[in-house]
């Protein structure tokens, strides 16, 4: 599972600490402090500040100075330093052109931008299908932002983890994910977001996923950052997929007592190892009910917001 996104770039990816490929200014672009243990890091490559060197030059320098045959995990920062939420088709094309130089790449994350570079709703992503086709050995793939994105159902034989982080995940993309052919997928995290930023997926849009038909190997399901968390919880209470899960995640959304009560009134959850509900509006009485009903489950109810702010909000929007 890829770490929470609120505002910052990833610090850990694919179980590896992230190393930001450091370089000089545009006038004298050169690498700084490249570690020798290349395979021990997840590499973030891209523009890191406004009006600095652009991704095209940084990417060329990375290919020229790092033994990419040893890179196991890669995250792509900004391609255009001035319009950091744009340029993803060019960056993805550059990576695809260099695919043969990454024979050991296992994990890829596209759009690893902190909010100071680009709000998540501004990131204009490219269709990930060509990337997945170019890297058939990937086991983990993530992307941040979906502005203007149009995708067809994804196809990949080995992918085990898929994460899409956004302030608003369009329902048609949710349906495309549910229609994807990913037979090895064990972990799925979708940041569903708000209707204000084109989100608003319902249980109907998630039907293929909730039925269990979409991904037979699925063991972790995250429906995160959702406005209608209570309604999703009610749907999950009777969703066939839940019986085979080890981990269920409704974090970062607007869960309240009604949603938690629906979960407890539905099918048994005692088989879960973990139930992640952090960032919620649950009463102390409901939290106690969850702990009593699920004594052997790791129930994360951190970040209780009921007393602080009665008006609910998702963790990631703009």
Image: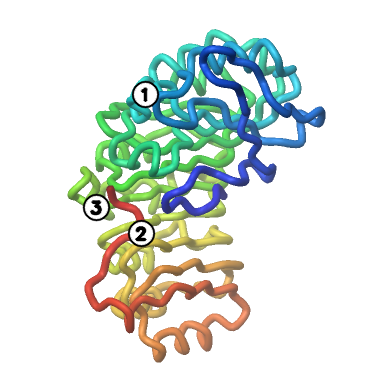
SS category of the residue bearing label 2 = loop
Residue 6 position in % (x across, y down): 42, 53
Mark 3 near mark 1, Cβ–Cβ under 8 Å?
no
User: Looking at the picture, does residue 301 appear above or below residue 86?
Assistant: below
Along the line of sight, the residue nearer the viewer: 209 or 37: 37
Q: Which residue is mark 1?
A: 126
Q: Quadrant of residue 127?
A: top left
Residue 35 image offset from top left, x and y in percent: 77, 30
Q: Which residue is mark 2?
A: 315
The x and y percentages for residue 198 are 21, 43
Is 301 displayed left or right of 107 in the figure? left
In the image: residue 233, left or right of residue 217: left
Which labelled disc corresponds to residue 194?
3
**Label 1, residues with CA under 10 Å away: few <14, some 14-19, many ≥20:** many
- Estimate how packed mark 2 is, as few (under 14), some (14 to 19) or many (20 or more) residues with alpha carbons within 10 Å: many
Q: Secondary structure beneath disc 3?
A: loop
Q: Nearer the viewer, mark 2 or mark 1?
A: 2
Labels 3 and 1: the sequence-earlier one: 1
- Image location (x, y in percent) of residue 171: 25, 42
Q: For the residues carrying marks 3 and 2, which lies nearer the camera in this image?
A: 2
- Residue at 69% across / 25% down in the picture? 32
Residue plotted at (39% across, 61% down)? 252
Examine the rendered structure and indicate whether residue 311 appears above or below residue 44: below
In the image, farthest residue toward the front? 27
Q: Residues within 10 Å of mark 3 (few under 14, many from 20)?
A: many
N-terminal of the pair, mark 2 or mark 1, is 1
Q: Nearer the viewer, residue 59 or 96?
A: 59
**Residue at horizontal 31 percent and vertical 60 percent from the top:** 314
Mark-to-mark CA distance, 3 and 2: 10 Å
């Amino acid at each position: 599972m890829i770490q929470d996104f609120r505002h910052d770039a990833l610090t850990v990816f694919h179980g590896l600490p992230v190393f930001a490929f450091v370089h000089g200014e545009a006038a004298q672009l050169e690498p700084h402090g490249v570690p020798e243990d290349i395979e021990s890091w997840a590499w973030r490559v891209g523009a890191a500040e406004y009006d600095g060197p652009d991704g095209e030059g940084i990417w060329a320098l990375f290919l020229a100075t790092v033994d990419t045959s040893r890179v196991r995990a890669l995250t792509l920062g900004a391609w255009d330093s001035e319009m950091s939420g744009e340029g993803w088709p060019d960056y993805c094309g550059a990576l695809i052109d260099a695919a043969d130089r990454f024979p050991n790449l296992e994990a890829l994350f596209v759009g690893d931008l902190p909010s100071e570079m680009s709000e998540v709703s501004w990131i204009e992503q490219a269709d990930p299908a060509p990337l997945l086709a170019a890297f058939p050995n990937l086991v983990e793939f993530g992307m941040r932002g979906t502005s203007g994105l149009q995708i067809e159902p994804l196809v990949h034989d080995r992918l085990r983890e898929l994460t899409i982080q956004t302030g608003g995940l369009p329902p048609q993309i949710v349906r495309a994910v549910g229609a994807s052919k990913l037979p090895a997928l064990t972990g799925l995290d979708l940041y569903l977001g708000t209707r204000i930023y084109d989100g608003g997926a319902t249980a109907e849009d998630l039907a293929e996923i909730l039925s269990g038909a979409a991904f037979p190997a699925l063991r972790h399901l995250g429906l995160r950052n959702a406005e209608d968390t209570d309604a999703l919880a009610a749907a999950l209470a009777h969703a066939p997929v839940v019986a085979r899960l080890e981990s269920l995640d409704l974090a970062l959304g607007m869960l309240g007592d009604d949603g938690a009560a629906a979960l407890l009134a539905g099918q048994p959850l005692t088989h879960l190892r973990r139930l992640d509900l952090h960032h919620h509006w649950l009463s102390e009485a409901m939290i106690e009910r969850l702990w009593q009903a699920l004594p052997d489950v790791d129930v994360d109810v951190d970040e209780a917001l009921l007393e602080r702010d009665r008006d609910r909000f998702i963790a990631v929007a703009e």
